[in-house]
Amino acid sequence: MAENCEEKDILSYSICRYSSFSYNYVPENIYSDNSKDQSSRWSSDSNQPPQFLTLKLDRPAIVENITFGKYEKAHVCNLKKFKVLGGLNDEHMIELFEGGLKNDHIAETFTLKKEIHDNLFPCRYIKIVPLQAWGPSCFNFSIWYVKLRGESNWDVVQPCLQWLVTFREKEAIRLCLKHFRQRQFTEAYEALQKRTKVSLEHPILTELHSMLVKHGDFEKSEDLLWQAAEEGLFDQYICDQDYTPKWTPIEPLPNGDNPSTYQPGMRGGHQMCLDLQTESLYLFGGWDGNRDLSDFWVFSVPSKEWTCLSSDTHKEGGPNARSCHKMCLDYERKQIFILGRYLDASMRTAENLKSDFYMYDITSGRWTLITEDTHTMGGPRLIYDHQMVIDIQKQTLYLFGGRVLSSVGSDRSGEPSFSGLYAYHIPTNTWSCIMEDSPTLKSRIGHSMLFHSKRRLLYVFAGQRSKEYLNDFFTYNVDTGQIDIITDGTKKDSGVPSAGFTQRATIDPNKDEIHVLSGLNKEKEKRENVKNSFWVYSIKKNRWSCVYRNENTGQQYWTKMQNLEPVPRFAHQLVYDHIRKVHYLFGGNPGKESLPKIRLDDFWVLKLCRLSTEHLLRQCKYLLRKYKFQELAERDPHAAMLYLQNDLASIVDHKNIQEREEFESLASTLFRSPGDETEGTEETILADTSTHHMARTELFDQLVAFFPEHMSQPKGNLVDLIPLT
Amino acid sequence: MAENCEEKDILSYSICRYSSFSYNYVPENIYSDNSKDQSSRWSSDSNQPPQFLTLKLDRPAIVENITFGKYEKAHVCNLKKFKVLGGLNDEHMIELFEGGLKNDHIAETFTLKKEIHDNLFPCRYIKIVPLQAWGPSCFNFSIWYVKLRGESNWDVVQPCLQWLVTFREKEAIRLCLKHFRQRQFTEAYEALQKRTKVSLEHPILTELHSMLVKHGDFEKSEDLLWQAAEEGLFDQYICDQDYTPKWTPIEPLPNGDNPSTYQPGMRGGHQMCLDLQTESLYLFGGWDGNRDLSDFWVFSVPSKEWTCLSSDTHKEGGPNARSCHKMCLDYERKQIFILGRYLDASMRTAENLKSDFYMYDITSGRWTLITEDTHTMGGPRLIYDHQMVIDIQKQTLYLFGGRVLSSVGSDRSGEPSFSGLYAYHIPTNTWSCIMEDSPTLKSRIGHSMLFHSKRRLLYVFAGQRSKEYLNDFFTYNVDTGQIDIITDGTKKDSGVPSAGFTQRATIDPNKDEIHVLSGLNKEKEKRENVKNSFWVYSIKKNRWSCVYRNENTGQQYWTKMQNLEPVPRFAHQLVYDHIRKVHYLFGGNPGKESLPKIRLDDFWVLKLCRLSTEHLLRQCKYLLRKYKFQELAERDPHAAMLYLQNDLASIVDHKNIQEREEFESLASTLFRSPGDETEGTEETILADTSTHHMARTELFDQLVAFFPEHMSQPKGNLVDLIPLT
């Protein structure tokens, strides 16, 4: 038994099974935490898979986390990669965690998956499967100490067990029902349903099955699908589909003959922010390729007009010309905050190295210099390429990262210095340093930081630290200070945007989504290059999806695309209107080696579009009609031809090449001789069901995929679950 | 597509899925066999699991073997360990092979599992899963070339597909039927069975279910089990149980006062062989601790008497004193053959180093010197610790291995020399060397070799080669010359006897079993030591089982055991009477460090016993009555007490401590208060079935385990197959 079971939520366990052990390194050694004792560990007798330890809990419990103790020094046998599984018996387990330990002496605790299908998942067995050790392949796996924590109170666990048993029973019955219906075991289907009262699916699907598969009534089937669409039954499916990005260039209305007076000029390293309430975009500063700018603009989305608020803010008591600064807008109080700037080495005099901090009051049109140097107030030194976000509710600005500028002399003396995490409370004009640059919170430049106003979390992603490209992703809770790592960036995964330091990110707190437009990428073994890719991260699903990627680099290609998609770039600005679901992109550096001084002044709107219900409904109808045509073709080629020319032709999406080609090939099936059948497949072997039953069932299964999973028959098939050996 | 598809049985395939690849090492490189091209290979981009290649065959086929091409030199990325899976779709596959490649340049071909449930198994997908590379853990996995061979003729494959589909359908229905019966979904059960005509089990089991679970008629249930036993339905179960070894010392009848005249003296390195027809054991030679012996004895099993045929065979024209020779008996022709001997270094003169070869004719009692030196006839040189077996049907002796003795001078000059595989055809007095010591057939000493007269195979197992302890196991077909490797000995597996060089093995061609009594073991990292273990290898099941293992080493223990089990030893003799299923053991060296000259003269008979039908039936009745008592106890404690004292007491095996204790504890359940129930389990949660249904079903499932699998309900449960996530 594990020691120290006094702590309230510690779950006691015993070793139930194991793959192997060496010498005296028996599995039972993991009961006690003796970090000074070399021999107080389990060690496998090889690293050949499968290696595992199965722990049996004294009683069923909801296992919340697992703690691994370690040796007092780094050790080659530590687990670099492992999995944790759990279940009510030791043969049927699900994965609860996959990850790795750091090769150090600090105990680590990992949260385990404790819910399935929104219910707490009770375990009696926990299986630890080592996959990789820190040392080279000759070293075995060692585990020094394991502590499990969770809830074993029978009053909590019993209902979960109850639920799990019921769930499995119900799913078993649903699989039977699905199978019986597919095989037309009507009587057995009815008897089972009557006895168990388990329903296979939403009634509309049962009706669809009856119309489509049983009666072959395709018109009624179309009606039912229309009805389903009306009732919003396809919304979930549509929501699960990836977005299609739709870029549109914004042509501002001319405000005179000279473009420089009616729209901001070419630039990179500028700042832009949005007043959600008035749909006004504010733009300030940047670098035009030759010099820093201090012009200040506003674009009104409703009127499509740029207005130059000031051609030089410095003259009006505002900030002097700058780039690589940050700007935030409080739309409740109509205030804009500006902090930081980049200084060329030659400019880094003691006077210039002060971190000035300005506020612009939109209503009065006035600038205020809050302080000449935030550092003297407990805030950051002069920084650039940092991130700044605003918590409007609590009137607090959060700043994280950025490179600290110092005079040329001091710069040479040591490592570059990065600024930590700071908070500025606006009403009291108070700065506080939450954390300096540290291993717990590695500071950086070129990262993204977003504030989720509902979850009260800062999301920090990627960035660069001297020559190190970071690819981690974590949250910081502004109220509790808790840091949660979403991905530590050590795992290679092509389904995550690669380490970048010029990506632009936005957040949608309503949809719980983060959007990333990548610019300059640092891809393994490749030269740095600029190419477009757009990623969406679903916070709820903890899942990235790449909405698009355009790897074209030729001048010619991008000239052709100039009104369709923005050329890849960095040092641009992207802001997001999460109410109207619209992104705005302005300017940036296209990274042309031949023209290093060129900057952009194009202005785009980006909408992320999803499949519409209408489009999906049309797709359903196309499937139905295509199939009806095939049945018709067998018994009445003439009628089939008419149907093809009318009903089917009218529904085809002729813009969809694949569909058009398929449609065109359908006619030829009319003239195929009956012997032309392809070689028998698994389906044709099962042909003791009615002529069209199998084919219609297949079509039905295709249509079911558009309905929410919880309303539909189980996805799996009973026969696929049959063990073959 | 793979090149070279002209060869008739080569299956063409294409890459269907893969885990990853590096640079230009794309999966498609495995189509072509370019052993000189470093880059003509698939290489994963890491060795982190899971890595795989999934190949899709152009059409379904029975895949018989897989060939891996290699680079022209050894390569760190070669697969030291991998698995091959196959199936009709790429999500539901079964394991077809697990093994590894040698790290050399020679292509290797592996036979894949191609049958399940005695039917050919058609595949459409083949998945190769690398598990370990030859190099340290920093190297990725590479596959250079893959060729698949098999049968894709539709006339052959179609019926297999048909069978597989039907099999899965049937098993699915059987799982449903089992589940419905367990849950008492009677109507659904009946409807399903009526419609599908699939039977769940043998009728006697259905009847047992009805009597036991439905009606609770325990007497009728006992009758049914008795009937099942009568019909031999338990034979399969009994046959699958491990043997219990039963040793009995043989006390030969005294033939005078002086033991040395009525039984052979202490010795090791002697030979013994059996005349199956007369049940006579012949014993010749050996080393008594001080000198080689040349006495020749026969033991008559029926009369339990030893007879000394000669106190010195050399005097009668037979072999001179020797040990480490080999002896074979042809019971058809009543001839005994003797070859080989060990010579002390001081004795290795040219004259002595001749390999003499004797035959003893049992009927006439005469010795014949067949040749003074087999080597001059094309046979082996003088050898010891070799193996010799006889093929009585074709009158041929087979010799394999043994150390070649050479004069002391020549011995120093080089490596020890091992003798190859020789055949001696008795009627024509012809020797032939089948194969010299070679990597294909590694020669050795201290191995086991057995001849399977029905399969016409030599089984070769273990042995030693200088400091290398071999643990391989292979067959040599004496008619075709084909070598098949059963295990190459590289895989660590605690379920196989460990590498030994003094084990004694026997074969039972009727039961298709090999028996191994291990002596001196070479276990990893441990000093050589002598301990008893007995293993049985089932040729049909390709499965080892350890019948017993006795690790006791103390003098005291073995003194106590002297009439119960032979003390561990080596250099002993073990012969087997496969007609009467009896082993005989005589003498040997107990390996006592303190008394190195001591040898043994004990004589044992070993019987391998199995559970009897009567015993199993009693066990069934015990289960039934124990359960009946529990039901009785709930409603009528008094009747239960009487039942316990009479019916149950009469059936308990009081020698079985566990059962006796259980029986004794049963009485106490009568006085347990009703609230004493243990915490709810999965079963108690499912309690909406009749009071005793669950418990009776559990008992039924316990009893079903004694019936042959093909007659019983499926072992699995539907709910256990339900995926939880």
Image: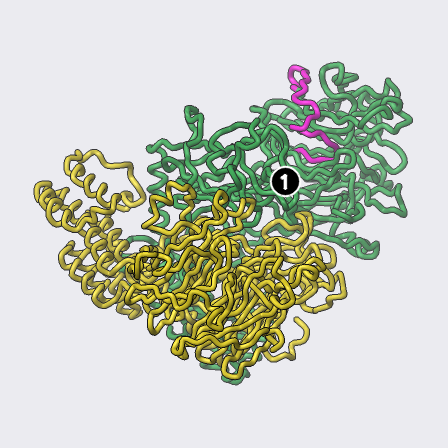
Chain colours: A green, B yellow
What residue is rendered at 67% in x and 42% in y? Answer: A516
Can residue A222 be seen by looking at this rendering? no
Q: Residue at x 75, y 44 (%)?
A: A521
Q: Chain of mark 1?
A: A
Q: Is residue A479 visible?
A: yes
Q: Number of labelled discs?
A: 1
Q: Position of residue B468 (x, y in %)?
A: 60, 55
How far across and how far down the image is residue B148, in percent? 60, 70
Quadrant of the frame with the C terminus of chain A: bottom left
Q: Is residue A282 above or below residue B331?
A: above
Is disc 1 surrounded by few (<14), some (14 to 19) or many (20+) residues within 10 Å? many
Q: Magenta part mainly helix, strand or loop?
A: loop
Element type at marker 1?
A: loop
Above or below for A191 versus A490? below
Q: Nearer the viewer, residue A496 or B23?
A: B23
Out of A660 and B657, give the one closest to the viewer: B657
- In the rendered structure, the answer to whether residue A519 lies left or right of residue B514 reads right
Q: Indicate the position of residue A549 as horizontal and vertical percent values.
A: 70, 52
| Image location of residue B606, percent across then percent down | 34, 58
| Quadrant of the drawing holding the N terminus of chain A | top left
Q: Residue at x 54, y 37 (%)?
A: A143
Is residue A177 shown in magenta?
no
Q: Is A381 on the left-hand or right-hand side of A1?
A: right
Q: Amino acid at mark 1?
A: Trp
Would you say residue A446 sits in the magenta stretch?
yes
Nearest the camera: A89 or B403? Answer: B403
Residue range (magenta): A425-449
Placement of B215 over or under A685, stated as above or below:
above
Identify the residue under disc 1: A134
Q: Is residue B595 left or right of residue A139?
A: left
Quarter of the rendering containing residue A405? top right
